[in-house]
Image (spheres, rainbow, N blue to C red):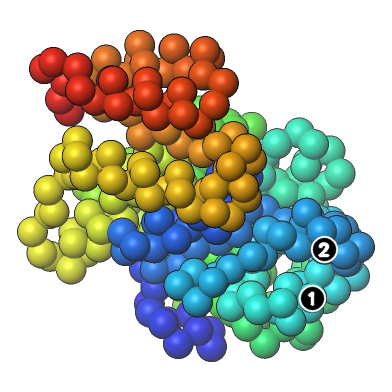
Amino acid sequence: MKIGRLEKECRVFLAPMAGITNLPFRTVAREFGCDLAFTEMVSSVGMIRGSAKTRSYLDSTPEDRPLGVQLFGADPAVMAEAARIAAECGADWIDINMGCPVRKVVKNGAGAALLKTPEKIRDILRAVRPVVRVPLTVKIRAGWSRGTVNAPEIAVMAQDLGVDTVVVHARTADQGFSGEADWRIIGRVKERLAIPVVGNGDIRSASDALAMMRASGCDGVMVGRGALGSPWIFREIAAALSGTAAPDPPTLSERRDIIDAHLKREVDYAGEKAGYRSFRKHLLWYTKGLKGGARFRHAASNWVSAGQMWEAFDSFLSEENNHLE
């Protein structure tokens, strides 16, 4: 799948996730075959104000390419300027968030709230498209509510205004992240577009990715929560898409090495205290599927340092009869 001016072919994407898809996590995902990763969702207002924290979301390395920057906001002029700045800062791809259902985002008319005002979407795209030469995409939901599903119409408008790809999360905004994603909606979007369509929602395994593509005809898949604690899902999906044998899941020893490398990157990037704090949630995700994992996660509230965390984790892995469930 070729997208706009992007030279690399991309079919398997890491979704932008607030507080999760920082540089360390993105590089881990890429080593397992993620074709394209996104920054955390970036405020357009923070970008044009030069907020140090906002700009830090764009931190990257040569191994972290191509890098998509996802912007959110509701003011067309602000969104255009933020997109221009992001491209100047090295973004390989600009994505406009039209799907976030979080209250603090939608209350300002941004994210999924834009689905209720197609005219605002039109104004934003007309402002942004002329100022960036890198690929421009939109990430949308099926609609604001189950009674107002308008993803196909929004996608057609986006295509007509020069968007290179549409990403569809097959839930409505009022579903949040609950219930099941309706992949048929992705198919309805795909039927009406000539540009690539990427499907998102409920991909927790390589078989899910294949099932989504078969059900919807989408050109690529975007993995979000399915990558938490199992970044090797990308190599599994890549193997499935290429028709090669599925790789073995990591052994306990290999999982320990992956966890160790991930923590080291977090600490190298943010310092020991902040790096440990950022990584802690990942360790809890990494233990899902391990015998006794629930008990281990419950005990996490007692950790006060990285050393204590590692001591508890090594003890957990060495417990007799511990294995992957």
Residue drawn 39% across and 29% down? 310
Earlier-in-chain disc, 1 versus 2: 2
Decide: few, some or many residues near mark 2? Use Cα within 10 Å; few <14, some 14-19, many ≥20. Answer: many
- Rendered position, 64 above or below 17: below
Residue annotated with mark 1 = 85
- Rendered position, 37 above or below 61: above
Indicate the position of residue 233 as horizontal and vertical percent values: 29, 50
Decide: few, some or many residues near mark 1? Use Cα within 10 Å; few <14, some 14-19, many ≥20. Answer: some
Q: Is residue 309 visible?
A: yes
- Rendered position, 314 above or below 89: above
How far apart, in angstroms, are the residues tagged by discs 1 and 2?
Answer: 8 Å
Q: Amino acid at mark 2?
A: Met
Indicate the position of residue 307 as horizontal and vertical percent values: 46, 29
Name the foreground residue: 34 vs 74: 34
Q: Amino acid at mark 1?
A: Ile
Query: From the viewer's perspective, is 246 left or right of 255?
Result: left
Name the foreground residue: 204 vs 164: 204
Residue annotated with mark 2 = 47
Indicate the position of residue 91 as horizontal and vertical percent values: 64, 75
Q: Is residue 284 visible?
A: no
Residue drawn 37% across and 20% down? 312
Query: From the viewer's perspective, is 101 left or right of 306?
Result: right
Indicate the position of residue 169 as horizontal and vertical percent values: 51, 49
